[in-house]
Image (tube, rainbow, N blue to C red):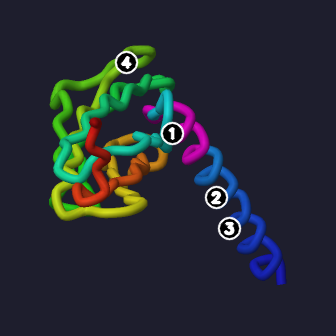
Amino acid sequence: MRLIIILPVLYFFNFSLYAQKQNEQIKHLPIINFIEDEVNLGEAMEGEVLEYTCRFVNDGKETLIISNVLTSCGCTIVDWSRKPIFPSEAGEIKIKFNTENKIGIQSKSIIILSNSIKEKDEIKLIANVIPRSEAKVSP
């Protein structure tokens, strides 16, 4: 009978220690804090290449390492520093969006894979691409 009572108590105690240890580990992970995580690039003429530099800070207590940056479309190219970003340091991701054959409101996602607390962070770019045929000719 005692065993029936002791086993659940021991299990609960062990689970509590495990959860507490995980919380301590989470407190020390890097945290990406973007200056902007949704960027409106405004209007652009079809065929233009729009450029944006996304800046962020590592607000965590450990070194941030970005392992990869993925885009939702081949029309978007990214470049980022492969070096570690120490706590309180800033980093940036350079983004180029080619509007060739893109018309209307465009929404592109950039996914950042890292050792941050979220492991996968996202930036959204929005632009309104005007067709070349609608370009206004100045008299």
On residue 14, the disc is: 2
Name the one closer to the observer, 20 or 102: 102
Q: Disc 2 vs disc 3: Cβ atoms closer than 8 Å?
A: yes
Asked whether 98 falls inside the magenta stretch, the response is no
Quadrant into which the N terminus falls: bottom right
The relative height of residue 134 versus residue 27 in the rendered view (above or below) is below
Q: Which residues are magenta?
A: 21-31
**Amino acid bearing label 1:** Gln
The residues tagged by marks 1 and 3 sit, at their Cα atoms, a distance apart of 21 Å
At a point 78% along the width and 82% down the height, the residue shown is: 4
Can residue 1 be seen? yes
The residues tagged by marks 3 and 4 sit, at their Cα atoms, a distance apart of 43 Å
Q: Earlier in the sequence, mark 2 or mark 1?
A: 2
The residues tagged by marks 2 and 4 sit, at their Cα atoms, a distance apart of 39 Å
Reading the image, the residue beneath label 4 is 90
Q: Disc 2 vs disc 1: Cβ atoms closer than 8 Å?
A: no
Judged from the image, the secondary structure of the residue bearing numbered disc 2 is helix
The relative height of residue 115 versus residue 54 in the rendered view (above or below) is below
Reading the image, the residue beneath label 3 is 11
The spot of residue 136 in percent (x, y) is: 31, 46
The residues tagged by marks 2 and 3 sit, at their Cα atoms, a distance apart of 5 Å
On residue 69, the disc is: none
Q: Earlier in the sequence, mark 3 or mark 4?
A: 3
Q: Disc 4 vs disc 1: Cβ atoms closer than 8 Å?
A: no
Asked whether 27 falls inside the magenta stretch, the response is yes
The spot of residue 104 in percent (x, y) is: 38, 62
The relative height of residue 94 versus residue 75 in the rendered view (above or below) is above
Disc 2 vs disc 1: which is toward the camera? Answer: 1
Reading the image, the residue beneath label 1 is 25
Disc 2 vs disc 4: which is toward the camera? Answer: 4
